[in-house]
Image (cartoon, coloured by chain):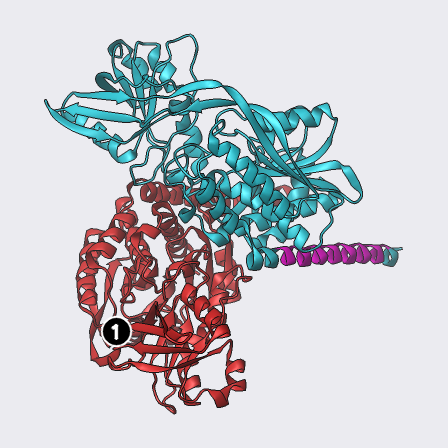
Chain colours: A cyan, B red
Amino acid sequence: MKKYFFSIIICFISIHLFAQNEDSVFIRRVANEILSNGKAYDNLRDLTKNVGARLAGSPGMVKAEKWGLRVMKESGADKAWLQECMVPHWVRGGQDKAEALYSGSSKKSLYVAALGNSIGSGGKAVSADVIEVTSFNDLESKKDQVKGKIVFYNYHFNPTFVQTFQSYGDAVRYRSAGASRASKYGAVAVIVRSMSHSTDNFPHTGGMNYDTAYPKIPAVAIGLQDADWLNAQLQKSQVKVSLTTYARFLPDTIGHNVIGELTGSEFPNEYITVGGHLDSWDLAEGAHDDGAGVTQTMEILRAFKALGYTPKHSIRFVLFSNEENGLRGGIKYAEEAKAKNEKQIFGLESDAGGFTPRSFSMGGSVAQLEKARSWIPLFLPYGVYQINRGGGGADVSPLTRALGTPTGELSPDSQRYFDYHHAANDVFENVNKRELELGAINMAAFIYLVDKYGL
Amino acid sequence: MKKYFFSIIICFISIHLFAQNEDSVFIRRVANEILSNGKAYDNLRDLTKNVGARLAGSPGMVKAEKWGLRVMKESGADKAWLQECMVPHWVRGGQDKAEALYSGSSKKSLYVAALGNSIGSGGKAVSADVIEVTSFNDLESKKDQVKGKIVFYNYHFNPTFVQTFQSYGDAVRYRSAGASRASKYGAVAVIVRSMSHSTDNFPHTGGMNYDTAYPKIPAVAIGLQDADWLNAQLQKSQVKVSLTTYARFLPDTIGHNVIGELTGSEFPNEYITVGGHLDSWDLAEGAHDDGAGVTQTMEILRAFKALGYTPKHSIRFVLFSNEENGLRGGIKYAEEAKAKNEKQIFGLESDAGGFTPRSFSMGGSVAQLEKARSWIPLFLPYGVYQINRGGGGADVSPLTRALGTPTGELSPDSQRYFDYHHAANDVFENVNKRELELGAINMAAFIYLVDKYGL
């Protein structure tokens, strides 16, 4: 009996090892294909340099959708199409300007950028003395001095969080809610220290929201060097700033998700979704955010086709519309999946930059997380060594809400992300070819394993 | 009895957990100090921009040694001094030039750089037809066609190694030994494809050696774009190249290791050595190679002093001389340690770039490696998740040979290293502040743990 038992165990272990070996061999083939013949980097050059900025509603968005559909087909999709959704249409409307008047008659131009979704000054200067606050608590303590002023939120990105997304999560409330919190006490505009611990002076834009209970006032991000100058100058003298911005909303317009599909051989009506978002802020090329995720997504498709791999389930490769200031693409995709009663077994996203991979974050049940973690030895040669409990990316998260789909997101090294995030220096030249490709390799491996073993 | 046994176990576990917790708290303090008040990045800017290139024997070397001694003192060394050693004095001697003549009378300038330690053409052009070989085997098969020609080694960096140092180890023999292997068959010069899988055109220099059995011929590295052009052109026509280089050796000269010390409280005559190398190739600022290691080394010292940490053993912070083309500094340091019968308990180096940390490599016994690995949970929050068997860096390895000292090296992410290695773009702007700092944090943690627990 004992002997019999051991035979079963050995047999089981053998099968398990064989499967592991088969998987590691396939993943090695995917890696070799991507590292040797990869197109993600060339596609990223094309997207960033020939399409460029592509905010929802902009001519760049339309161009990007055509580009995406073409590259999706070239990458080998069995079918590819556009999925229509209405998107917001916010425009910067002109060149944001800010001039500081200090120490009597000295003047200094400040490098600012209107926050996304903010209402501009209509092209006329808003001129007022600046009052600096370091936090919302500080704002509350100074609320009687705010009326008629421009509030300068000088909350620093916390450098001691090793994971920089923690610093972002900590600081971003000043960008998103700072305008209305200041408007409540009569501020005429806000200047927000950029969400970054870079050492340069690029202002970092990004989405904000107004609390409709208070007047909508102009809101800009300021570069870090100018923020530090403003802080230092305010210790010495009053500073008056003239702020001129042009931002406004036009009526919603039509945008599209770009979708490609590899049809499953066994379960064609069950889907694995993988994607990144096609839109970018208007200031830059959107290379890391999220040209990286877009080109990695199509690289997985290209590599699977190049290797003649036919998945058991259908795989959807999705370039989502309007992640930056509306998430309408991700919502639309989940809505339609729900309306069609699609079985969506997993959603994976890349929207944290094209940097060297370290981990995945993942939602779902404890059992699903443990199953995914059992695959870490297969990811390890390519840089992923942990899977953390967390959500999927913004674009796939509506799948969880609509259908309960477990979702995940690639978590590459985060040290450089906020040097470029939503700023004019988020350009192709700041992406490394191999780091981008390693992200695609780990994602491809994850998709392959979910397709083979389920979750 | 059983109860008594469990009490001991619980007591033991408690002490162990307390120690682990005490360690993690201290390492967190080190991390906060470095991430909040770090000077490594400012020091690196100063070294790269105000000292610049600093090859052994050059005026830059002398300037760098003065700089190093000053910053070592400013960082808080209990004592700091220069340790003299003779260093080779190779000079490039002029602007390397290569011009290709092809398809009859068309001309193209090629971007080349004489290899370190090579003998130039004496400022006169060496002109000859080019013969391309893809490997030493290929050279052997074409040995009868080599006489009077310039041999072009077009061996590609293998993109499928995820650890790029494997690609380097695989390809570097063409740089180091290619000239004499070709000279053996009568070649008049060699052009070597740069040791890189970057997408730009910078030639990457680096050390080479002659086999004295054959004539010493000029040897240059060529940028990858020009290498690809040369390869393509050779399919279409003969290509004649005129190569003009000026490199030569001057007599050996005096260089110095820069050494700082924190004196141990319990074992002042037992040493832990940590360092990087102060010299760099002449073409660039040596930011990653090895300004990063130099400034990380002094940052560990600065952080320990800022926190009032007194080590039990003496810690030596060493900026080694002449790693690039002689290793005389590392050899001298070990020689003197042996002559003085110093007890050197550990040597740690950073010479793989200022990139985001992933692991350490380490020599020593199995037990020492296992002990170090037991500390991985303490490194993990700062990015190091594995310790691989391997050697220490080049500069600390003479300690192993002389005294049996176990040594290690920081292994940061390697994807970008060979984009910059030994090339003109190894500049400050390509180093990220936080990645540099995280390397210093993990090294500081390792030093602290060895100081506390031994190896």
The spot of residue A364 in percent (x, y) is 65, 33
Q: Magenta stretch: residue A35 in it?
A: no
State which quarter of the image contains the C terminus of chain A: top right
Q: Is residue B206 above or below residue B15?
A: below
Residue at the location (80% across, 54% down)?
A12
Quadrant of res A156: top left
Q: Is residue B114 visible?
A: no
**Quadrant of residue A382 within the rendered picture:** bottom right
Query: Please, what secondary structure does the residue beneath circle 1 have?
Result: loop
Badge 1 is on which residue?
B92
Q: Is residue B72 visible?
A: yes
Q: Is residue B445 left or right of residue A389?
A: left
How many marks the image carries: the answer is 1
At a point 39% along the width and 45% down the height, the residue shown is B27
Q: Amino acid at mark 1?
A: Arg
Q: Position of residue A194 (x, y in %)?
A: 34, 31
Tag 1 subunit: B
Q: Which residues are magenta?
A: A5-30
Q: Quadrant of residue A143?
A: top left
Nearer to me, A119 or B304: A119
Residues A29 and B436: in front is: A29
Judged left or right of residue B440, residue B44 is left
Seen as rendered, the residue at the extreme right is A1
* Viewer-proximal residue among B294 and A87: A87
Query: Which quadrant is the N terminus of chain A positioned in?
Result: bottom right
* Residue closest to the far bottom: B213
Which residue is depicted at the point 80% across and 43% down? Answer: A266
Image: A433 above or below B169: above
Label 1 crowd bin: few (<14), some (14–19), many (20+), radius 10 Å: many
